[in-house]
Each structure stands twice: as C-alpha cells, then as structure tokens.
Image: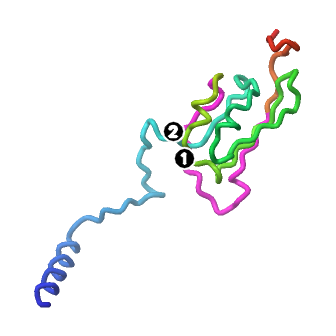
Amino acid sequence: MKMKIASMLNDVFVSLFRRPFTELYPFAVKPAPARLRGKLLWAEDKCKGCMLCVRDCPAKAIEIEVADRATRKYVFHYRIDRCIYCAQCVASCKEDALTMSSTLYHLASADKATFTEVYTSKGTGVCREDGAET
C-alpha cells in the first residue's frame, strides 16, 4: 500500500513542473494536414446533374433537385450533420464538380440550421435533346 501512495505522490510532484499536453484549441489553431477531408464544395459550372454523388453517398448527405435540365439548373443540398467525410462522392464524380476542402473544417455549431448548405446553380450552357452541349 505504501508503494502505491509513494508512486502516486511522485507522479503528482513531477506533473506539477511539466508543461501540459493539452492544446489551447480555439485560441491557438494548428494548421490542418494537406489531405484533410473538410467541408464538401460544389462547383456548379462543372456539374452535369448525373446524380452519381447522390447514389454513392453512404450517409445520404447529398440531394440534388433538378430545376431545369435543359439549362442545367440544379439545387444542391449538402447536409453537414449527416456527412461522414468519406469522400466517396468526390471519387464518383466524373466531372470533378465536388471537392473536399482542407481549410474549411471548423464546422461545429449549436444551431441546427447551419448544418444544411443549399447551393443553387445559375445554369450555364444549353443542352440538346441528344445530350450534347451547344
């Protein structure tokens, strides 16, 4: 019993003079790794509306509404609270319209409304009926 108390007191005295291992996170932010999977970004000008990202998302965090397929107008819904940051949607997008940001990763919030991002495309290009772009 005396050995346990002596070793415990030794640990207490040693830790009094050591620097803490904790980080001052909100005040001192370290740079993120280059390959960090942060917030999903959508490039509306590259999106063809093929819905591969919606189909391949295991968490069902992406929804695309087709406003007008002829003028390529889409409404892209990204639910941050459902996303598991696996980047499967980025890998399945053949047009490179989706990317994971390595700088936008501070996504915590107490407001539930901030967890849904809605992007609306302006529509670029005109598609013919055979699928070719003019």
| Distance from Cα at disc 2 to Cα at disc 1 | 7 Å
Residue 105, disc? 1
Q: Quadrant of residue 4?
A: bottom left
Q: Is residue 44 left or right of residue 18?
A: right
Q: Residue at x 66, y 27 (%)?
A: 97
Where disc 2 sits, the SS reads loop
Q: Along the line of sight, which residue is nearer the eye, 86 or 43?
A: 86
Amino acid under label 1? Tyr
Picture layout, residue 117 above or below residue 44:
below
Q: Is residue 27 left or right of residue 119?
A: left
Q: Residue at x 69, y 37 (%)?
A: 55
Residue 102, disc? 2
State the quadrant of the N terminus.
bottom left
Q: Quadrant of residue 41?
A: top right
Q: Residue 12: x percent and y percent?
A: 21, 78
Q: Residue at x 79, y 31 (%)?
A: 121
